[in-house]
Image (spheres, coloured by chain):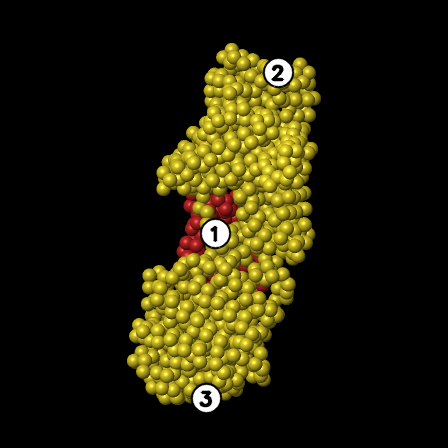
Chain colours: A red, B yellow
Amino acid sequence: MGSRSSILLRDEEIDEIRKETGFSHNQIIRLYHRFNRLDKGNNGFLSREDFLRIPELAINPLGDRIIHAFFGISRDQTLNFKQFVKVLATFRPVQDGSDNRLNSREEKLKFAFKMYDVDGNDKISRDELLLVLQMMVGANISEEQLGCIADRTIQEADGDNDGLISFEEFCGAMDRTDVEQKMSIRFLH
Amino acid sequence: MHNRVRRQRFSGILLLSLTLFVCRTLAGGENTTGIHGTGEGPTDSNDEHDDPEDGRMGIAHGHVHERYPVAEVNWHHVETPYIISLWVLFASYAKIAFHLTEKLAKIFPESCLLIILGIVVGVIIYFAAKDVMLEYTLDSDTFFLFLLPPIVLEAGYFMPNRSFFDNIGTILLYAVIGTLFNCFCIGASLFGIVSLGWVKVEMDLLDCLVFSSLISAVDPVAVLAVFEEVHVNEVLYILVFGESLLNDAVTVVLYRMFKQFASMGPQNIQAVDCVLGVTSFFIIGIAGTVVGVVWGLLTAFVTKFTDHVRVIEPLFVFVMSYLSYLTAEIFGFSGIMAIVFCGIIMKKYVEANISQKSHTTIKYFMKMLSSISETIIFMFLGLSAVRDDHVWDVPFILSTLFFCLFYRAIGVIILTALANQFRTIKVNKVEQFIMAYGGLRGAIAFSLVALLEAPTDILKTRKSLYVTTCMIVIFFTVFIQGMTIKPLVDKLKVKRSNKHKPTMGEKIFTRLLDHAMAGIEDVVGSHGHNYWRDKWEEIDRKYLQPLLLREPPEAKDNQILQVYTNLNIKDAMEYVKSAGSFNIRAGSMANFLRRSTSAPGFHTNNGSIPYNVSDICLDMHSVGGAGEFAAREVDDAEIHHVSNIVFGSMHPPKRKHRYKRSMKHHMADIEQEKHDHLLHRSVHLHLRHVIKQRKKKAKMANRPSHHSLHSENGKHSRNSSHAHLEKHQGHHHHGKTPHKNVSFSIDTPSSPDEIISQVHVEETVKEEPNSSDEEGGITFEARPGARKASDTSVSQVERQPKVTATALELVNIVASSVGAGEYNGHDETDAPASPRPEIEPTAAEALLPWKQYSEPRLSDRAREESFGALGTPTPSPTGSDEEVDAAKADVSKADGQDDKEGLEDLDAPDDPASEDKVGQSLAQSTPAEGHFFNNAEDDDQYNGDDETSYAHPRRAQHLGDSDSDDDVDHHHHHHRPRGKRRHHHHHHHHHHHHRHHDEQESDSGGEDNPCTVVTMTTVTLWISMPVRTPVILWTRLCFLTVFH
């Protein structure tokens, strides 16, 4: 199976992806396997349905938002391997020295921001925040409490008092959070 | 101070030594009656047998020689506990003293100072009473049974779980492999040294390994003591500290195994023994963990049922975790791992189950116990160092020290290289250095050495050598490394921990990330720790929480909510700190309430009312006069009192009504309620802030118009204002009267002066219409009686010549506060508060805003709009409508342009997210919380001038930096500026009024005039509610936070 995938992926492509994303050769091949496994229809691209078929993701309270953010970069509803890897490259650990645009703090935050930003207008509104909150806590907290929490959150971050959180404001609010650490996962070599 | 402290400490030492000496003398020099260490270990059984005998003999002695002992000395009876207590006391003194000596504390970690102190005391005792010297050493049983568990429990209970489990792999690697590596390397190297003939004391490989097994383990107590003062980042901290905790199993196994092997003799050891040893390692470690987890879950389960016996809640936590330790020790499992995991596991559930007070108790008690244990441990380490039988085999000692450091460094480097292969976040070089450097040895090693049996002379010498070496290693690591690690951390720029309470956004963000990263891992198809955390949380949610938590894991347990509450508490505290006036008023309020509630004839006896009022005025006066007053001091007693009265009497209705919609809040448990109320109050507070911000612009623009009204010269003729008022009343048929309410209520001007000025404002009735104009809408007075009252008071005041009007003014103040009180009361309780017997509910109540608040608010806007469309001034269900309405009315009176501006501002959403109109800030809140919103808004209105201080603390901060008053002047309610101005112009009046009030108090006895009725009503209402919002809120918050 592995051979099949790696045959499909040409070395030049791998090289290109490697340069762009910083993934190692093996990692890219590994991801390509994964990509093919997810691509049930063998279309060469992933649809939202393919993502939703991942069992854990389907039950992830924010699964929907994660997929949304995943598709954020491609306006159409599909994701080819390059795009797939590019999104995943966001979550590469930040290494000293090997500085890569794709896994910078800003890119990581951008992904998180996209998870909030339902309508894609580059602002988080109260409703959007509330939606995410509701997804996360389920029925644990009453609507009114959530509302207050959302208000408070916006209030904290809202620098220009427009009741919306822009990406800059978002970054500012997360200033003290160790995003590099929290938004990194380990890719097997 | 420095000198004083030193002297103090010195005299303390002298005192103690003296005491001990005297004790010994009293004890008659018996050689066995002392204590070992703190002297309770089972090995002291001999002593314990002796003690009672001695005691009895003493008593018998007394009886033989005297008829009846007037007084007798029963020293033996109390000796052991007495000496223990003295030690604890002394250790605590020492702790105090160290923290007084800033210079010392800066250079030395506390552990060093304690060791030094121990040595000093040891030397003194050594010369004073050499024969007892040996008794004051760190006793192994005492250490393991009594001193160690509290420290480890605290470590486990307050373990940063998240980072602990995130790094568990690395920690285990260091703890298990690292310790093994160290042990064998040090052991082998020492044997090498011995084989070279450099060491005079004879020992074989096993002896070396026994020693290396105990010296190689990093000590949690020492690490904790040093790293607590060096605030390195959490990952680094958890790596070192976690290792020191989890290596216990390894240490125990190795120590026992080698000891056993050594006693068996090398020739008898077979491979099977080694296999068994390895097996036992897993058993000891894993079984210890299991024991801890089981006890932890048990504890959590038990606390599920303690809601009627809150007092003993902390006991369960302590006793059961201690039992987990002891249980593990029974079977020879790792007690440390047991108690650590017990603490880790139980914490989450226990905290959700127990009351806030119990939680605080646990927290403090745990910290106290561990702190004092630590103190005693280090002191006794110092004490134990003073002894005769040191064996100074320099090559052995030095090489041990060298190997300890060397192999620690090697081990860390190798293992980190290994761990980094698997870690997302690599451990960098600097961190590796600190890890290696932080490998401190401590009391566990010493206690283990002390446990070595030494029946023969050779063994004794060897043991003494071990003890000496161990001491040197401990002292070196604790002193040299402990002292230099802080500068090193600074110098190497190790990432520090940025410990702060997470903001709301951060908390939500973190939560989001947990899910997101788990999701990404799912996509990638690798199962990292995000995956496992996710799995664990699912199990936790599905099975553990329902089983272990008293209530379903709802709001209370939710971390997000917790953070939210904490943030609000913090804000509140900051506010209370920044605006100290609150306390004073809380105090005066306490007096007021006490008196009023305790006065039986209160409702009928008018005389008492002015008294109360004037009392408050006087309080305020004194505040104004004294300026600072003791404002910053939180008077707990007073606040407590207020809270008792206020909460006690006012919560019931609130619970009934406010929570109608959220059934889950139906809990009889007061603690629970406190929590919920807290939340609601925070919500309230918060909303107020939101609204205020929203309104700010409107108000600013609006202000000029009102301002002109007020400020023209503040001399609106009474008639005109009255006309204005009546006109306004005309709008509000349905038996409702707009009440002005410059809140005399305690609600909070940001400075005492403002209170006074407020009183002045109220005294000058003519100004009121303005404000009632603005606020009339909100103050729906549902009770005809009350309305009449305020009308009467107003008109009466108008009829009175100003100079003699004080009594009536007073009444008016109160009357005006009816509005505030009334409304606030409803805000807070959503129902008529209890002490208001004379008021009958009227049909109009059906129209009361607060009645409608209890209904779903979804339709509010629609309703508002329909009202608007009708164009009638009918009382609309929300204060916001009223406000708009009122604002319009007001505006119509004022200059046209200003009006327009004001209206525009009112109407124009200054926030895209908000819908239209001022009242629409409702849109900010979910429909369901409309009442909060209104609540906030109303308070806003009523306490207009209090805004800054009273409102959201953040706001207070924002505004109040240097010029909160002025700032407010510019931003807020009209009567605020006016109030201020009043204050400036009429400050002297104030004194007048006080006098008047006092007079009235004395002579306003039994007349049954409208005034008194009004006064009665008002005051009653006022008591029932007014203060509520602010005082309750702040008291509660104070409360909780003070103990938090």
| Badge 3: residue crowd in 10 Å (few <14, some 14–19, many ≥20) | some
Please, what secondary structure does the residue beneath circle 2 have?
A: loop
Cβ atoms under marks 1 and 3 closer than 8 Å: no
Seen as rendered, the residue at the extreme top is B197
Disc 3 sits on a residue from what chain?
A: B
At label 2, which amino acid type do we have? Thr
- Residue B696 seen in the current view: no
Q: In whole angstroms, how far apart are the C-alphas of marks 2 and 1?
A: 58 Å
For this rendering, which residue is in front, A117 or B83? B83
For this rendering, which residue is in front, B393 or B186? B393
In front: label 2 or label 1: 2
Seen as rendered, the residue at the extreme front is B67
In front: label 3 or label 2: 2
- Residue named by callout 1: B501
Residue at image coords 46%, 86%? B792
**x%, y% of residue A167?**
43, 56
At label 3, which amino acid type do we have? Gly
Disc 1 sits on a residue from what chain?
A: B
**x%, y% of residue B103?**
37, 38
| Badge 1: residue crowd in 10 Å (few <14, some 14–19, many ≥20) | few
**x%, y% of residue B911?**
42, 68
Q: Which mark is residue B456?
A: 2
Q: Which mark is residue B730?
A: 3
Please, what secondary structure does the residue beneath circle 3 have?
A: helix
Question: Looking at the image, is mark 3 or mark 2 earlier in the sequence?
Answer: 2
